[in-house]
Image (spheres, rainbow, N blue to C red):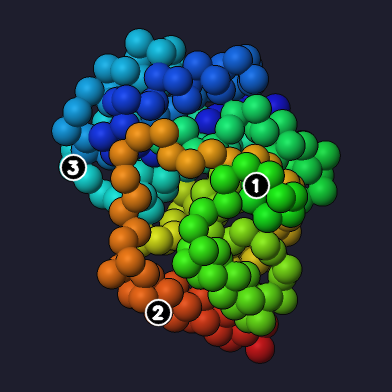
Amino acid sequence: MKLLAIIPAYNEAGTIGDVIRSIKKHQPSVDILVVNDGSADHTSEAARLAGAASVLELPFNLGIGGAVQAGYRYACKKNYDLAVQIDADGQHDPAELERILSPIREGAADCCIGSRFLEKRGYRSTLFRRFGIRYFAWMIRSTMKSRLTDPTSGFRAVGREGIQVFAGYYPDDYPEVEAIALLLRKGLTVSEVPVMMHCRQGGSSSITPAKSLYYMAKVSLAVVMTRLRGAEKTG
């Protein structure tokens, strides 16, 4: 099965090379696409030196949603069977890739998410963020009837149907939870596997405490609207 690793990157020149080398070590047959989201540093050069198969240059910073969708459009156009998202900051461990990919390869799920909370190991974020993650897990369970422990995890893989869905539409702002709701609304199956994650190896998070309340309100509304659209189609 043709596999693509999508790495959205914004000013990650300090970490992108190690991430690519680790991916190639653990999944030698994978194609690697770095989506350079208008970086002002040498992210593209570092990615090419590390052996990225392709670097997609966005003309300006679109944000995480736009960068990830660009990756899925590439995957759809090139007829990939599997696509996996990996952060460029070193938080996601490529040694865990096979765990995430196996349920899709075996036909047990259309999307598989790497969860920090199924096993108590590795970095699991701050107390405040864990509260937010539990809140979104409750929201997905309440609105979409799906039990997930780590819906904000960006370490996830999808099969061909998921690639087509995300190539057509991917949420713009804080997209992880809404993307899950979109797959569930379309009848795709979403599962989780335990993975170990690390604290970011470089850069800083775009989600500041001041943005957290906006994040929770925006994503909550988006999930509810996604659920309502699904109810309208089945009604």
Q: Residue at x 58, y 51 (%)?
A: 124
Q: Residue at x 48, y 41 (%)?
A: 199
Q: Is residue 161 above or below residue 10?
A: below
The image quarter containing residue 144 is bottom right
Q: Position of residue 3 (x, y in %)?
A: 61, 28
| In-front residue for pair 101/95 | 95
The residue positioned farthest toward the bottom in the image shown? 235
- Looking at the image, do the residues carrying marks 1 and 2 touch, with CB atoms under 8 Å apart? no
| In-front residue for pair 227/165 | 227
Q: Of marks 1 and 3, which one's residue comes earlier in the chain? A: 3
Relative to residue 147, is residue 83 drawn left or right? left
The image quarter containing residue 204 is top left
Q: Secondary structure at mark 2?
A: helix
Q: Mark 1 or mark 3, which is nearer to you?
A: 1
Q: Of marks 3 and 2, which one's residue comes earlier in the chain? A: 3
Q: Which residue is mark 2?
A: 217
Per the model, the C-alpha gap separating discs 3 and 2 is: 27 Å
Q: Position of residue 195 (x, y in %)?
A: 68, 42
Report the amino acid beneath label 2. Answer: Ala
Q: Of marks 1 and 2, which one's residue comes earlier in the chain? A: 1
Report the amino acid beneath label 3. Answer: Phe
Report the amino acid beneath label 1. Answer: Gly
Q: Which residue is mark 3?
A: 60
Mark linked to residue 127: none
Q: Secondary structure at mark 3?
A: loop
- Looking at the image, do the residues carrying marks 3 and 2 touch, with CB atoms under 8 Å apart? no
Q: Which residue is mark 1?
A: 114
| In-front residue for pair 2/135 | 135
